[in-house]
Image (cartoon, rainbow, N blue to C red):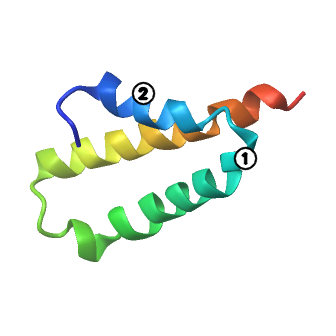
Amino acid sequence: MAEDRNESEAVFLRVAPSPKLRLFREGLRLFIRHFMLRPSSTKFLSEEELALLEDRAAMAEKALTAAESELQF
């Protein structure tokens, strides 16, 4: 939820290309989807904060899967 979207994306892009971190990436994706976007976790957020969280979660998902899609033919 950092102010700068590019800073947030850079964090996830640093772990994306490493094949050794595949399980770590999958764990991060699971954590984001299961715990951070869960309705019981988001019920205390304003609409603006929820939209920002959903945007950042989608960005993180895309960044974490970017390397996998580049490797597949």
Residue at the front extreme, as displayed: 20
Residue corresponding to mark 2: 10
Query: Which three-letter amino acid code belongs to the residue tagged 2?
Result: Ala
Q: Residue at x 24, y 45 (%)?
A: 51
Q: Is residue 72 above or below residue 30?
A: above
Q: Residues within 10 Å of mark 1 (few under 14, many from 20)?
A: few
Q: Is residue 43 above or below residue 59?
A: below
Mark closer to the observer (2, 1): 1
Q: Is residue 19 above or below residue 29?
A: above
Image coordinates for residue 13, horizontal then vertical, percent: 52, 30
Q: Specify the quadrant that holds the C terminus.
A: top right
Residue corresponding to mark 1: 20
Disc 1 element: helix
Question: Is 73 situated left or right of 68 in this image?
Answer: right
Q: Specify the quadrant that holds the N terminus.
A: top left
**Would you identify the image quadrant in which residue 38 lies?**
bottom left
Q: Is residue 37 at all visible to an observer of this figure? A: no
Q: Residue at x 85, y 32 (%)?
A: 72
Q: Residue at x 53, y 63 (%)?
A: 30
